[in-house]
Amino acid sequence: MIRTTAVAWVLLAPGLLAAQEKFDIKLKKRQKGDAVTVAYEEQTTNAMIVSGADGKVVEKKNQRMLEVAKFREEILEKEPSKRATKLKRTYEKASVTIDGKAEVFEYSGTAVTIEKAGDGYSFTADGGKVLKGKSAGLLTKEFSGKKSDTDDVEEKVLPKKPVAVGDTWDVNVKEFLKELSGEDEVKAFDLDKAKGTGKLAKAYTKGDQQFGVLEIDLTAPLVALPGTEFKCEAGSKLQLKLTLDVCIDGSAEAGNMTGDLKFAGKAKGSQDGMDYGLEFDVSVNRTDKHEPIKK
């Protein structure tokens, strides 16, 4: 009886595996009028050693920074497949802590209208005050740079065909970094040698919605430090690991994301007529939680 059961299982197993459910993964694209709550924390550790032309250490730097924000975001103006040109955020909190010293931004606890203005964005707080420089806080960092005008950055890491749990796929890192980075930043990478893979690690339902856990791993050699004349040595690279526990049927922008980003390596260059060498190790850990708000 045991032998018969074992033989039956061997014969049936291929059919069971072939019948494994496949998922056409889609992420929700925001439209005008959509609103979500967003909460995130981003911790950055920046370690750097600067050496002179003689190899002697000139400076050592080790900085820790923690960004925290929570807000309600509503899209006020947006064309299909384009980044929003006008949106409103009502902040519950927004702060940054650098080496233990905390600063709460002045728009924490109020609403800010963010609107496309030329190559960048303007930020206007309730009451009409325009936020610039230090008063704009994290907003300048998030919205600055000539990044792609499309809203399909996440699409670059998704599979091109339906996948089952455990399936993997190649990620077009070249296109992903072009969408994500500014014009100067993308020049820092050897895009032809960039590599990436994705995996559907888990699938489950929540109510009548399909959720899944996506694991994304990306690497790209660094050839330069963005915005500088410093050229990176062989072995310098970017590593990015993303875990998205999100709605994958395209019906809602809901779920959590964890990202671990690392820049590490060595570089050489000149500044103010002097030659320097750099050893750098930058780590960024970020967690995001998005919850849709029903209309």
Image (cartoon, rainbow, N blue to C red):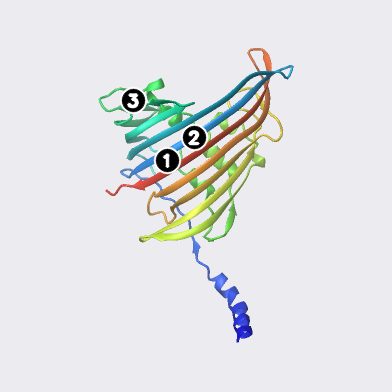
- Which of the 4 quarters of the picture holds residue 274? top right
Residue displayed at 34% across by 44% down: 36
Q: Residue 43's spot in the image, x, y percent?
A: 49, 34
Residue at numbered disc 1: 82
Q: Quadrant of residue 40?
A: top left
Label whose residue precedes the other's in the sequence (2 or 1)? 2
Q: Earlier in the sequence, mark 3 or mark 2?
A: 2
Q: For the N terminus, which image quadrant?
A: bottom right
Kind of element beneath mark 2: strand
Toward the top, the furthest residue is 273
Q: Nearer the viewer, residue 248 or 134?
A: 134
In the picture of the structure, the residue carrying the numbered disc 2 is 43
On residue 121, the disc is none
Q: Horizontal placement of 30 versus 46: left or right?
A: left
Nearer to me, 184 or 67: 67
Residue, far right: 54
Residue at which label 3 appears: 106
As helix, strand or loop, the secondary structure at mark 1 comes to loop
Q: Are marks 3 and 2 in contact (CB under 8 Å)?
A: no
**Residue 269 in the figure: left or right of residue 240:** right
Cα distance between the residues tagged 2 and 1: 29 Å
Q: At which x and y percent is residue 268?
A: 69, 23
Q: Position of residue 34 (x, y in %)?
A: 32, 45
Counting from the top left corner in percent of width and height, residue 102 is at 41, 26
Q: Crowding at label 2, few (<14), some or many (≥20) Cα neighbours within 10 Å? A: some
- SS state under label 3: loop
Residue found at x 27% / y 28%: 126
